[in-house]
Amino acid sequence: MRKINSKFITTFISESGSFLQNKDYFAFVELDKFAIYVIADGIDSDADLDSAKIAVSNIISNFSEAPSMRKGFLKKLLNLANKELIEQSKNLRLKASLTIVVTNYVKIRYAFVGNTRFCLFREGFLKYKSQDQSLTQQLVDKEKVQLDKLANHEERNNLYCYLGQDQNLTPYISKKIKLKNGDIITLLTKGIWENIDSSEIRDGLVEATESQEVIDNVEDMLLSKQPKDLENYTLAVIFIDKIYENPKLKQKIKKIVLTLIPIILIILIVCSVFYFKNKKRTEQINEMNYCIKNASNYIEDENFIRANEEYKNALDLAKKLKLEEKRSDIDKYFKLTEIIINADKYLQDSKYQDALDEYLNAKEKGYYADNLGKDYINEQSNKTNQHILVLDVLKQADKKMEFEDIQGAKQDYTIARDLAAKIFFKEAKQEAQDKLDKINEDEAKKQKEEKEEEKALEEEQAKTDEEEEKEAKEKLDAQLNAIEMAKKGDLSYSIGSYHDSKMYYIMAQEIYKQIGMYSFSDELEKKILLTDKKIQEATIKKAKADTYVKDANTKFDQGNLNEAKILYLFAKDIYEEANLEDDLKSVEEKIKVINTLIDKKNPKNL
């Protein structure tokens, strides 16, 4: 009854343009409840098969079996047509651009692939228009190409979606559009829109009373332009003089209203319940967030017990509200504050190692809890470390006391006392001070005893020193005498008086032996041996020199003055080397006599 009670007038024209074969195709079917209008542009060069006709026929055939305006149904129609083109491709791959318009005589929905176009004019104005699935359209959308250049742009036929492609088809499918009496729909291929824009088509609609007039006006404009290489052109015009009006609409509305009232009441009740439930939930979430905020404030004040209580309340609310992510975060904070509280308790109970372990655990857990209380944890762990250090120093001092290292222990107790004072560790400070006082008391007692001993020793030492002083004076005098004797010995040795030297050395040696200076005595023994050696050498040398003198005397008596002189000179060298002064003088006198005698014999030498 819809078709009979509505008036849709359709007129179209399809021509080959400048080409021998027309690859465009338009067809429509108007059924009782639905109508479909399909226009296609074959974009392949197959001369035997008409891709546009195959696609349009397939779509109309499948539509007629079970007509519908659903988006999914329109997509299915396009996919079936795409599959049909692929299967019928033989020599060449069949391809087509295509636009569908489906109506229930009250509303329409359009879908397209490629660059065939749809326009809807209302009251003389363009109301709706499709966009091409081409590279040029993408450039226009990106404002890289002006809209008025689209019809002549070189990439206008470079399509990214069309029927006959292997990839997944991605058609554009519009939403439903409510029709009005007097609306005009146009479907056109590129032979039209490359040469006639939408404003010119609108001019062709002016004062036209029927669709055929529009066709004639637009074709006249197209041909008057005499375009070179005019593409196949197809134009379909649908005049919507009257849309379908349901006579039972009021009854239907009344029925719908009566049906909807209980539904609306149920919805209102559900919404109310949901509202109050949501309101309560919102209040609980706000309360949870308030607890978290309070906990943060307590943490800033280093009140971790109250912060832990607030986190516990927030955690219970998060569990109740089933906020798993929030619950996980709050649980980290809650457990961290528990660890800090336990650590503080250990520190308060003087369980310093346990406290340190807990603070280190808190530092590790804090990394995953936004470093909550980081400064406090660091401060407390440092404080605990210092307590442990004080106790370690005290233990070390006690150990030194066991090994009687009093000064080392005293130094460590002092260090422990000072460290304890800095960190207000009263017990350790008192313990260290008590032990220092004990050491000082023991030292004072020992010093007193040592002073008394020292006084007795001093008196005894004074007596001993007096005797030693006397003995030392006597020994010093003897030593000086021995030194004097040794010096005389050295002097005699230096002038060759070896016998005198030996005598002085023996006297000095005896003195050193008497006063117990045996090292000096041994040194003099070496000098005595050396002197004996010198005496022996001098004796040998003197004997040899005496022999030279004796032979020289003989030569002198025989008148051999030169030979006598040479022998006297040999003797002179030996006497001189042996420091025999008397013998040396005697020989020198004899050499003078010989020199005088030689000079007298040889006056020319004067």
Image (cartoon, helix red, strand yellow):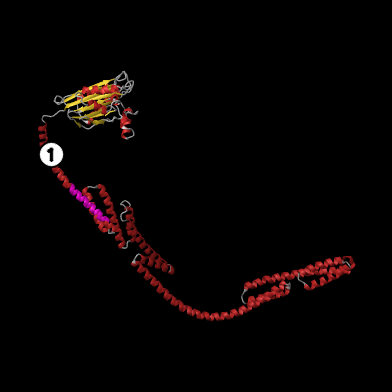
Amino acid type indicated by mark 1? Ile
Residue 62 in the magenta stretch? The answer is: no
Write the start and end of the magenta stretch as one range.
278-296
Where does label 1 land, which residue?
Answer: 263
Q: What kind of secondary structure does the magenta stretch mostly adopt? A: helix
At 28% from the left and 23% from the top, the residue drawn is 222
Could you tell me residue 93's position as x and y percent? 32, 23
Query: For this rendering, which residue is in front, 55 or 7?
Result: 7
Local secondary structure at mark 1: helix
Could you tell me residue 577's position as x and y percent? 76, 68
At 19% from the left and 50% from the top, the residue drawn is 283
Query: Relative to 12, is 362 above or below?
Result: below
Query: For this rendering, which residue is in front, 2 or 440?
Result: 2
Can see residue 311? no
At 31% from the left and 30% from the top, the residue drawn is 150
Q: How many marks?
A: 1
Q: Is residue 65 left or right of residue 51?
A: left
Query: For this rendering, which residue is in front, 379 or 430?
Result: 379
Could you tell me residue 344's position as x and y percent? 30, 60
Q: Quadrant of residue 14?
A: top left
Query: Relative to 260, is 504 above or below?
Result: below
**The N terminus is located in which quarter?**
top left
Query: Relative to 194, is 365 above or below?
Result: below
Q: Is residue 472 left or right of residue 598?
A: left
Can see residue 202? yes
Q: Residues within 10 Å of mark 1 (few under 14, many from 20)?
A: few
**The C terminus is located in which quarter?**
bottom right
Q: Quadrant of residue 465?
A: bottom right
Query: Relative to 561, is 253 above or below?
Result: above
